[in-house]
């Protein structure tokens, strides 16, 4: 079993909403982590992430971020909320903690996009932000040891 999992979230048929998938596409040859694609997170993902020490979630955002991307630690604290349409990362982490008594390190990488209309092409700004996020991710993964399991 690999110690890291990357879950790419999005829809590559909706322009920049495919940023998470494009990020994962660039890492497919990485032998140090498992990579999965999702349209959205599901309740079942709580069990999935329970098998890993570190989980990376990658998704697009409509927000304009200063660097074009941002890392957010997901702790799964607070009120558990979910719907049948979408499940927030915090809810998946909290379910993992409550149902499987484990707490992997979960980091959400959000990448700024600007065109979320139908189509398979990323906007030029999204492509720039993707390159920055990939570069930062490569450096961070090489320099950041895995934490001890909780």
Image: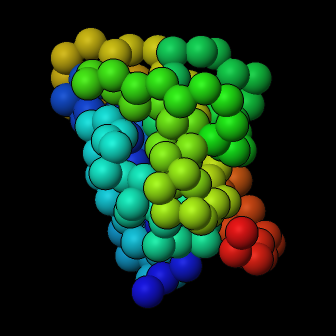
Residue at the far bottom in the pictured view: 1
The answer to whether residue 125 of the structure is visible from this angle is no
For residue 14, side relative to residue 57 (left or right):
left
- Which residue is depicted at the point 59% across and 15% down? 63
Percent coordinates x, y for residue 125 in the rendering: 52, 24
Quadrant where the C terminus is found in the figure = bottom right
Q: Where is residue 42? Give x, y as percent.
A: 32, 41
Q: Residue at x 60, y 72 (%)?
A: 53
What colour scheme does the image use?
A: rainbow
Q: Is residue 4 above or below residue 44?
A: below
Residue that appears at 70% across and 53% down? 136
Q: Observer-nearest residue: 20 or 100?
A: 100
Residue 62's x, y, as percent?
51, 15
Q: Depth check: 102 or 62 in front?
A: 102
Q: Quadrant of the N terminus?
A: bottom left
Nearer to us in this view, 81 or 87 = 81
Query: Disc count in the image?
Result: 0
**122 horizontally vs 106: left or right:** left
- Left or right, 100 with respect to 106, comes to left
Asked if 140 appears above or below 111 in the picture, the reply is below
Residue at 69% over, 44% down: 75
Asked if residue 96 shows in the view, the reply is yes
In the rendered structure, the answer to whether residue 108 lies left or right of residue 44 reads: right
Residue 95 pos. (x, y %):
49, 46
Q: On the image, which quarter does residue 112 sit in?
A: top right
């Amino acid at each position: 079993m690999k110690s890291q999992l990357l879950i790419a979230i999005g829809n590559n048929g909706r322009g920049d909403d495919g940023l998470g998938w494009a990020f994962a596409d660039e890492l497919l040859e990485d032998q140090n982590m498992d990579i999965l694609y999702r349209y959205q997170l599901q309740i079942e993902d709580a069990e999935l992430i329970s098998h890993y020490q570190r989980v990376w979630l990658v998704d697009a955002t409509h927000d304009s971020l200063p660097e074009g991307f941002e890392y957010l630690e997901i702790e799964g604290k607070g009120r558990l909320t979910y719907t049948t349409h979408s499940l927030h990362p915090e809810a998946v982490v909290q379910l993992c903690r409550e149902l499987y008594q484990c707490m992997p390190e979960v980091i959400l990488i959000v990448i700024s996009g600007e065109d979320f209309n139908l189509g398979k092409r990323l906007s030029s700004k999204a492509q720039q932000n993707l390159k920055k996020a990939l570069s930062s991710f490569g450096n961070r993964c090489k320099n950041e040891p895995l934490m001890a399991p909780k």
